[in-house]
Image (cartoon, helix red, strand yellow):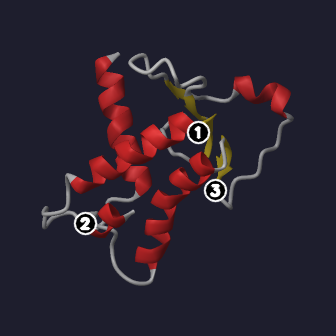
Amino acid sequence: IAKLEHVPLGSYPTKEYDKLCYIRWLAIAAVGGGWIADFDVFPLHHLDHIHSLPATTWKDYDNPAIDRPLVVYEANAVPCLVSGSAQAYTKMAHAIVQQGLKYKEDENVSLMSDMMSFQSIAKKNDKNN
């Protein structure tokens, strides 16, 4: 969490909100994984139909201890509805902070939100597949 002080998080009043958006990844990992959703996301279908949503899945082939991949149920890699194991959330939390830290001294970047970091990782992931 201390590393977040070096990620460009904009300015007041949204700086604290953007910091909490990063922290939510660790929070869901701390409770054993599961689902997270933005407050303005309203699931309209029963979970039996969740497979029909556009999704981006990250599997960690280097770490067989991760029992469930991280799945983002949005085609543009907006992490507004996400599911995964505690291990998958922990790994992604560290990855998005590391991605945000790449911009700590970039004067042209005043905000690198968790979503922006996540989308940067998704673009890299798409290029590697």
The residue most toward the bottom is 12
As measured in the structure, the alpha-carbon distance from the residue carrying label 3 to the one carrying label 1 is: 18 Å
Q: Nearer the viewer, residue 62 or 112?
A: 62
Quadrant of the image occupied by residue 14: bottom left
Q: Quadrant of the C terminus?
A: top left
Q: Of the residues shown, which amino acid type is indicated by label 1?
A: Ala
Give the class, few, some or many, for how many residues have Cα within 10 Å of label 2's Cα (few <14, many ≥20). some
Residue shown at 34%/79% (left/top)?
11
- In-image side of 122 versus 107 (left or right): right
Identify the residue under disc 2.
6
Question: Secondary structure under badge 2?
Answer: helix
Question: Secondary structure under badge 1?
Answer: helix
As measured in the structure, the alpha-carbon distance from the residue carrying label 1 to the one carrying label 2 is: 25 Å
Q: Quadrant of the N terminus?
A: bottom left
Question: Number of labelled discs?
Answer: 3
First along the sequence among labels 3 and 2: 2
As measured in the structure, the alpha-carbon distance from the residue carrying label 3 to the one carrying label 2 is: 24 Å
- Where is residue 89? Give x, y as percent: 52, 41
Please give the label number shown on residue 86.
1
Identify the residue under disc 3.
38
Q: Of the residues shown, which amino acid type is indicated by label 2?
A: His
Please give the label number shown on residue 39.
none
